[in-house]
Amino acid sequence: MEQTIAGRLAAVRASIAQAAQSCGRSPEEITLVAATKTQTDDTIRQAIAAGVTVCGENRVQEFTAHLAAGAYEGARVHFIGHLQTNKVKYVVGHVELIHSVSSEKLLLAIQHQAEKLGIVQDILLEVNQAGEASKDGFSPSQVLPAARLAAELANVRLRGLMCIPPPSTGPGKNLPYFTNLAQLAVDIRQEIGDNKADIVYLSMGMSDDYQDAVRAGATHVRVGTALFGPRPPVPTNLGREF
Ligand SMILES: *Cc1c(COP(=O)(O)O)cnc(C)c1O
C-alpha cells in the first residue's frame, strides 16, 4: 500500500480510470471528491498540493474552520454531510455543490438563503434507498415530488442525485443501489423535461465501492479513507457522521 496521500491519490485515480474504461467511459467524466471530515488544515493542504481538486466537507463547524484558515486554497469545495436548516447560511454560496439535500424543508431553506444572496445554488437530492433510519434522504418515491419542487425554485438548480448505501460487503454488492439511483435520475429527467440538461450528476461511491459506482454511471465519487488512510477521531463533539 502507498502510504503518502500522493501515492494513494494516484492509486485511486488509476482504479477510477480502470473502472471507467471497463465500461467504455472516459475517466474525465468522473470527479473525485476528497472526503475530508476530521482531517486537519495541514492534511487538506497536502491533499490539494498532491492534486486533489475538490474537497467534500461533512460538518458545518469543520467547514467554516477550514475555510477561515484558507485550507481549501487551490481547490473547490462541496458539502456532502448532514445539513441542518438553521446552518444553511454558513454553506449556501460558499460551496460549489451541496450533495446532501435530504428534505423539502432543507430545500426551501437553501432557496431562501440563495435568494437573499442573489445567487443560484447547485444541489443534489439525497436518496435513502434502503430506508435506513440512521440516514437522511428522500425515499425513492419522494424524490420525484422533491425534484418537481426544486425545479420551481428560482435560486436552486437541481443537478442530480446522491446516495449513501449501507457499507459494501464485497465487490459488486452495492451495484444494485447505484444502478437504481442512475435509473431514478433518468426517470426524473424525463418527468421534469430537463431540456437544459441540468440534471446530470450522480454522486455515489465511497472508498469501498467507488469502482462499482463508476460502472453504474457515477459522475462524483466521494472518497475519504482510500485517500487519507484511517480517519483521525472527531476533533470535538461535532455530532453524527452523516
Ligand atoms: C465520510 C464520507 C465519505 C467517504 O467515506 P470513506 O469510506 O472514508 O471513503 C463519503 N461520503 C460521505 C457523505 C461521507 O460522510
Image: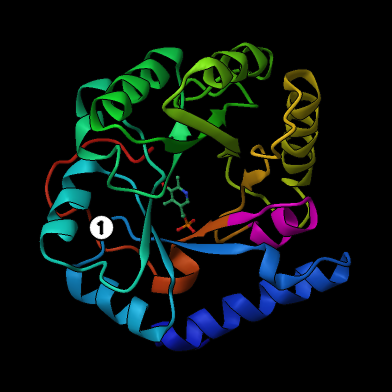
Q: Name which residue lies at 62% across and 13% down.
A: 142
The image quadrant of residue 195 is: top right
Q: Is residue 191 left or right of residue 6?
A: right
The quarter of the image holding the C terminus is top left
Tell me how the rendering is colored. Answer: rainbow
Whether disc 1's CB lies below 8 Å from ligand 1 is answered no
The picture places residue 188, in percent across and down from the top left corner, at 73, 24
Residue holding disc 1: 38
- Eyeballing the image, is 140 above or below 127? above
Whether residue 28 sits left or right of residue 42 in the image: it is: right
Q: Nearer the viewer, residue 5 or 124?
A: 124
Image spot of residue 64 (x, y percent): 16, 49
| Relative image position of residue 106 (x, y in whole percent) | 37, 20
Residue 46 inside the magenta-drawn segment: no
* Membership of 211 in magenta stretch: yes
Question: Above or below — where is 146 with respect to 100?
Answer: above
Q: Which x, y percent locates residue 148?
A: 62, 15
User: Could you tell me which residue is drawn at 64 percent across and 45 percent down?
Assistant: 201
Neighbour class for label 1 at 10 Å: few (<14), some, many (≥20)?
Answer: some
Figure check: 148 above or below 234? above
For the magenta stretch, what is the residue range?
209-220
Name the residue type under label 1.
Answer: Thr
Query: In the displayed structure, does residue 219 sit left or right of residue 65?
Result: right
Tag count: 1
The image quarter in which residue 109 lies: top left
In terms of depth relative to the viewer, which is nearer, 157 or 52?
Answer: 157
